[in-house]
Amino acid sequence: QSVLTQSPTVSGAPGQRVTISCTGRSSNIGAGYNVHWYQQLPGTAPKLLIYGNSNRPSGVPDRFSASKSATSASLAITGLQVEDEADYYCQSYDRSLSGWVFGGGTRLTVL
Amino acid sequence: QVELQESGPGLVKPSETLSLTCGVSGYSIISGYYWAWIRRPPGKGLEWIGSMFHSGKTDYNPSLKSRVTISVDASSNHLSLKLTSVTAADTAVYYCAAHDSSGRLDFWGQGTLATVSP
């Protein structure tokens, strides 16, 4: 049971838009800690996708965007491409646990 | 560009100690960043194991704290992980990574699979 809750799977057709949610609580996202998002392509290491709730690192397409509100965060991917098939993770800090926590991950399938 | 490379035995027996190292290139390990170990068990998600700042300050996942030691060797620019009394539940791909104070994991190693089996 992960501290941050993500839906296990999401799917969409090429060109469509999907959103991935990340639900936390008052000890993590709700306490104002930053949320970061990672993309893990099959057989590779995770890669930073979004940092500081809504910022894209250099090189990440603007098809990827994210937001945060209250005790949750969400990642949106528009113009879905086959190469977007991956596992997506949110991450934040939890002050009750005094440590970094990840969501359980969401597997994106592009139909 | 910062590069990280994990290494260690691929197979560890139950109750023994898992020891992994992570070589860092392109950046001095004592210049900044927090240095972390993260794992992904088969079929599961990512789990933060612990982090160490170059000053020596360490933070560990409470669920693993009694069994984990993370250390840094500035002379060789390496990061190390020791996990004692391993069980099958510790089988995972282990990643070393560098993060800032907000937790942003900027750089990752490619990962190394550690299997716990008799």
Image (tube, coloured by chain):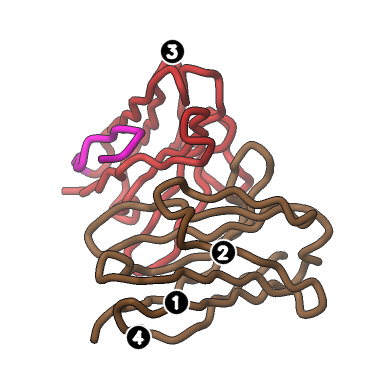
Which residue type does callout 2 highlight? Thr
Q: Chain of mark 3?
A: A
Which residue type does callout 1 highlight? Leu
Name which of mark 1 and mark 2 comes first in the sequence: 1
- Residue at 41% in and 67% down: A44
Question: According to the image, label 1 marks what residue?
Answer: B18
Question: According to the image, label 3 marks what residue?
Answer: A70
Which residue type does callout 3 highlight? Ala
Position of residue B68 in the picture relative to residue B98 (left or right): left
Marks 1 & 3, CB-CB < 8 Å contact: no
User: Callout 3: few (<14), some (14-19), or many (20+) C-alpha neighbours within 10 Å?
Assistant: few
Position of residue A65 in the picture relative to residue A86 (left or right): right
User: Callout 1: few (<14), some (14-19), or many (20+) C-alpha neighbours within 10 Å?
Assistant: many
The mark tally for this picture is: 4
Report which quarter residue B98 is drawn in.
Answer: bottom right
- Residue at 33% in and 67% down: B90
What numbered label is drawn on residue B69? Answer: 2
Which range is magenta? A1-13
Magenta span dominant secondary structure: loop
Report which quarter residue A79 is drawn in.
Answer: top left
